[in-house]
Amino acid sequence: MAAEDPIVSGMAGRYATALFELARDERSLDVVKADLDRFEALVTESADLQRLVRSPVFSSDEQLKAVTAVLAQSGIGGIAANFVRLAAQNRRLFAVPDMIKAFRKLLARHRGEVSADITVAEKLSDAHLGALKEALKAVTGGKDVDLDVKVDPAIIGGLVVKLGSRMVDTSLRTKLNAIKFAMKEAR
């Protein structure tokens, strides 16, 4: 399926495709996704782990030992743990966040879901997330929508929604920039 119509590309896409196909064959897509989500959250929350993942200073052995300890401590095992360890061993740990994102795209396609990237100025409540999901579900013809929400205070307010090739930018930053540009043109 993934090879027929590639929706991911590059090195991260190749790793994600291999992981997806293995997890699908082992009937453990949900477990692998949950473990990858947990690993991504650990990396996001820890500056030391971010440094380990991104820095070329650490050798592959050092990364492998550290990641193995983190995985064991957090209870991440099986296919996802082996995948992260393989990435560390191959000096590809820096690309794991992109691999996880590509894996999610493949999983969403497999499930018939659509993925939407949402950027907001502050964290949304569960009620607002539900309303946003329903609105996007109506736009996509009833398909389930998987939201990837990022908080960026720089947009000041509003939100930016990217759904496939479509993007809707209702951020205050964009509106203020448009007003600023219009005022410059009026001079």
Image: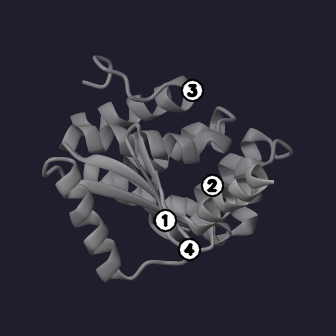
Q: CA distance from mark 3 to mark 4?
A: 35 Å
Q: CA distance from mark 1 to mark 3?
A: 31 Å
Specify the label residue 157 is tagged with.
Answer: 4
Find residue 73 and report its image quarter: bottom right
Give, as a three-letter code, the residue at label 2.
Val
Look at 39% across and 30% down and name the residue there.
Answer: 17
Look at 26% across and 38% down and name the residue there.
Answer: 109
Frontmost residue, 6 versus 185: 185
Specify the label residue 11 is tagged with.
Answer: 3
Q: CA distance from mark 2 to mark 1?
A: 35 Å
Specify the label residue 159 is tagged with.
Answer: 1
Frontmost residue, 156 versus 120: 156
Give, as a three-letter code, the residue at label 4.
Gly
Look at 17% across and 56% down and name the residue there.
Answer: 138
List x then y, in percent, for residue 113. Answer: 23, 47
What is the crowding at mark 2: few (fewer than 14 residues within 10 Å), some, or many (at least 20)? Answer: many
Location of the C terminus (image quadrant): bottom right
Judged by depth in the image, the label closer to the viewer, 2 or 1, is 1
Name the residue that disc number 2 marks.
67
Give, as a three-letter code, the residue at label 3.
Met
